[in-house]
Amino acid sequence: MVTSRRVALTIVWIVACGVRGGIPGLAPDAEPARPPSAHAGGRFEGAALGWTLGSEVHLFVADSDFARQVYRRVLRPGLAGDAPAGLDSAFGARHVLSLSADRIPARRRDPGYFDATVLHRGGAVPVALELIRLHRPGDCSAPGAVTELVYSFPQAALPAVPPSHSAVAGLFRAPAFLRSGAAPRPALDRDAARRLAARAAEAAEHLTAMSAAPRATPLTRRLALDADLAADAADVLSLLNPARSAAPYAVAVRARFREPDGDTVFVSAVVLTDTALTRPHWVMRPVRARLVGGLLEDGVRYVLRGVVIHPPSERELLLVDRIADVEAEQARALAIDPWARRVVAAQPLALRCR
């Protein structure tokens, strides 16, 4: 069994690296995501995460307060005059409350006006609001009400629209122009990517180990490049802004190690780095946990789902899944600005609406 001293160290590391920042694993000084807000006329502020579906994009906000704002300031004025004053009452007989964007009073209809910007690996694309849905608490695998916002891509952008079910981030503001993606650095070949992932995994294990303890050995030095694998796997993506030469790659690792006493531990992290791991910039700082029956007893796994450009700063945003085996309600999908140490958007990971 893992010694009590080792367990204590692991707990201290997790607390030091995340709880004060609000999301375990995130740097303690990280700025949490600001809650979005809704205004009359269907104007929103903030950011959200979602996915594409053909020529549409669906963004989700799991926040009851935001849903109440949307109902009071946007939906209710566009519904029949006898619509209940409060969201809870409106949900009384219905699971979903919906309103087409063309029925929103005072919504801007200027030629060329767009309601939001969708960020994906191919660039930044303006989108127009088509439909608002408010889902009753509990119907989207989330305890509170969930707001679903459906947008359409402009016809001119359709050739550059990402495939269906691509993960995206959405900013609730109109862009100045349609932006094509930055030319990314050439992707590493698979062998080089595996070597980089192995270096990152061993560095993460070293950072979380007791300084005087004998080094643990990796169960495999050939991590699979597969975002769907829970262990002994990694994700290696090129960053999109070629001006950042110091850390051209984003790497997420999920690796098992065998300690000298025979225990198996699991280490996960997300790092920006060069191929030599010269000066690693830890985005989701390394966390260490015991594996019990194949499940993490007190840790998390990180999966890197994508890299997008955040205009107008031209900084990259990382789309990261934080997966928890035991406390599944703590699992999150995150959009993180790694350079500013800021969470741009967050939502429950298993958000599925009926």
Image (tube, helix red, strand yellow):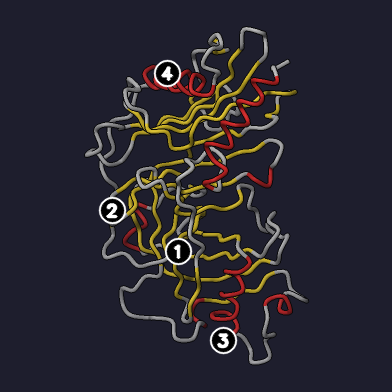
Q: Position of residue 288 (x, y in %)?
A: 59, 26
CB contact under 8 Å: marks 3 and 1: no
Upstream in sequence: badge 4 or badge 3: 3
C-alpha distance separating marks 4 and 3: 57 Å
Q: Position of residue 153 (x, y in %)?
A: 40, 62
C-alpha distance separating marks 2 and 3: 36 Å
Q: Considering depth in this image, is 320 or 185 the residue closer to the camera?
A: 320
C-alpha distance separating marks 2 and 4: 30 Å
Residue with the mark numbered 3? 77
Upstream in sequence: badge 1 or badge 2: 1
C-alpha distance separating marks 3 and 1: 22 Å
- Counting other residues with Cα less than 10 Å from the Cα at mark 4, is it few (<14), some (14-19), or many (20 or more)? some
SS of the residue under disc 3: helix
C-alpha distance separating marks 1 and 2: 16 Å
Residue 313 image label: 2
Upstream in sequence: badge 2 or badge 3: 3
**In which quadrant of the rendered image does the N terminus lie?**
top right
Residue with the mark numbered 1? 46
